[in-house]
Amino acid sequence: MKGNPNVLSTLNALLADELAARDQYFIHSRMLDDWGLQRAAARIAHEMEDETAHADALIRRILFLEGTPQMTPGALTVGTDLPDVFAKDLAVELRVVDNLRAAIALCEQERDYVTREMLEQMLDDTEEDHAHWLEQQLGLIRMVGLQNYLQSQMGGSPGG
């Protein structure tokens, strides 16, 4: 089924976002694990898996619409400490939220309701899970202090 060129272009832009988010979460999860913050590392690794699933859905939809997935991720911004890692990951998620909203509006305009529905689910995941969790963690750091928060993230089971 031949897709609308504007929708395909937008899906490829979203794919670049998801690949960048995946790669950024990947490096951050490994950094956090190396720092001994296993709970934070496990949660960020979970986010990486979610981003991979979003990328997979976009790739499948692009292929279904007879497009060619562009597999070049956007730019990464790697954090230097835990609050910076969370802040940089949150910035990526907020950019993705804005881009998803614009893409949903385009799909509505172009009457591509199946793609719109897929993107709405991704928006729910991004806003209610990824961005919300990161905002919570940054809030906790402010409330309990960085040292207390860091101590809570040590150990082998996922936190958050």
Image (tube, helix red, strand yellow):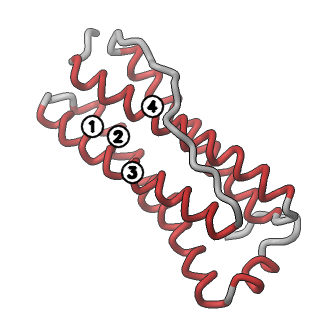
The residue that label 4 is drawn on is 15
The tag earlier along the polypeptide, 2 or 4, is 4
**Closer to viewer: mark 4 or mark 1:** 4
Quadrant (top left, top right, bottom left, bottom right) of the N terminus: top left
The residue that label 1 is drawn on is 116
Q: Amino acid at mark 3?
A: Arg
The residue that label 3 is drawn on is 95
x then y, percent, for residue 83: 63, 70
At horizontal 55% and vertical 58% (from top left) the residue drawn is 88
Q: Is residue 9 above or below residue 88?
A: above
The tag earlier along the polypeptide, 3 or 1, is 3
Disc 3/disc 4 C-alpha distance (Å): 13 Å
The tag earlier along the polypeptide, 3 or 2, is 3
At horizontal 38% and vertical 15% (from top left) the residue drawn is 64
x then y, percent, for residue 59: 47, 23
Count of numbered labels shown in the rendering: 4
Q: Please give the label number shown on residue 52.
A: none
Q: Residues within 10 Å of mark 1 (few under 14, many from 20)?
A: many
The residue that label 2 is drawn on is 119
In depth, the one of 85 and 6 nearer the eye is: 85
Q: Amino acid at mark 1?
A: Arg
